[in-house]
Amino acid sequence: MVSYSYIILRRKGRGEKMLEGKAQIKETDMPRKMQIQAMTSASEALDIYDVTDCTSIAAHIKKEFDKMYGGGWQCVVGSNFGCFFTHSKGTFAYFALETLNFLIFKGASS
């Protein structure tokens, strides 16, 4: 099991950085650049939506990834969920940020 943490910094006007939170990667096979994008998108979504609006948070992340990496991305956000799926190699990340867990992956093509 892969597990490591990132400190998410966001720019807040005029290049000032603010500490946004600590994201912990629980499992992934994504390239690091894509992992960082996933956590950045999650952090942005938490700034926009209420932490209880997991559907809107997930939709925000999915739309960002569809735009950046092509369609077919799936995203699950919540504090307690189970799942079973098949994903394309190099597209899976499961991480925690604040009180939520984030699962993002691109579905495997048949």
Image: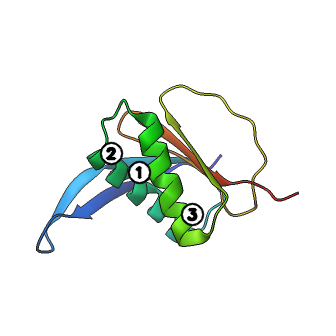
Is residue 88 shown left or right of residue 73? right
Task: Residue at 32% x, 45% y: name it.
Answer: 46
Across and down, in percent, residue 42 comes to 41, 51
Quadrant of the image occupied by residue 29: bottom right
Relative horizontal placement of residue 19, taking residue 104 as reference (left or right): left
Q: Which residue is mark 1?
A: 42
Q: Mark 1 belongs to which amino acid?
A: Ala
| Residue 17 in view (yes/no) | yes
Q: Residue furthest bottom?
A: 14
Residue 45, given in percent of the width and then of the height, sits at 36, 49
Q: Amino acid at mark 3?
A: Asp
The residues tagged by marks 1 and 3 sit, at their Cα atoms, a distance apart of 14 Å
Per the image, the residue denoted by label 3 is 66
Observer-nearest residue: 79 or 58?
58
Could you say where residue 80 lies in the image, as x and y percent from the top left? 53, 25
Residue 96 visible (yes or no):
no
Counting other residues with Cα less than 10 Å from the Cα at mark 3, is it few (<14), some (14-19), or many (20 or more)? some
Query: Are the residues at dot 1 and dot 2 in contact (C-beta closer than 8 Å)?
Result: yes
Task: Tell which of 59 and 14 is nearer to you.
Answer: 59
Q: Residue at coordinates 47% horizontally, 28% vertically from top-left?
A: 79
Give the residue type at disc 2: Leu
Mark 1 crowd level (few <14, some 14–19, many ≥20, 10 Å Cα): many
- Describe the element under mark 2 as helix, strand or loop: helix
* Secondary structure found at label 1: helix
* Residue position for label 2: 46
Quick check: 25 above or below 17? above
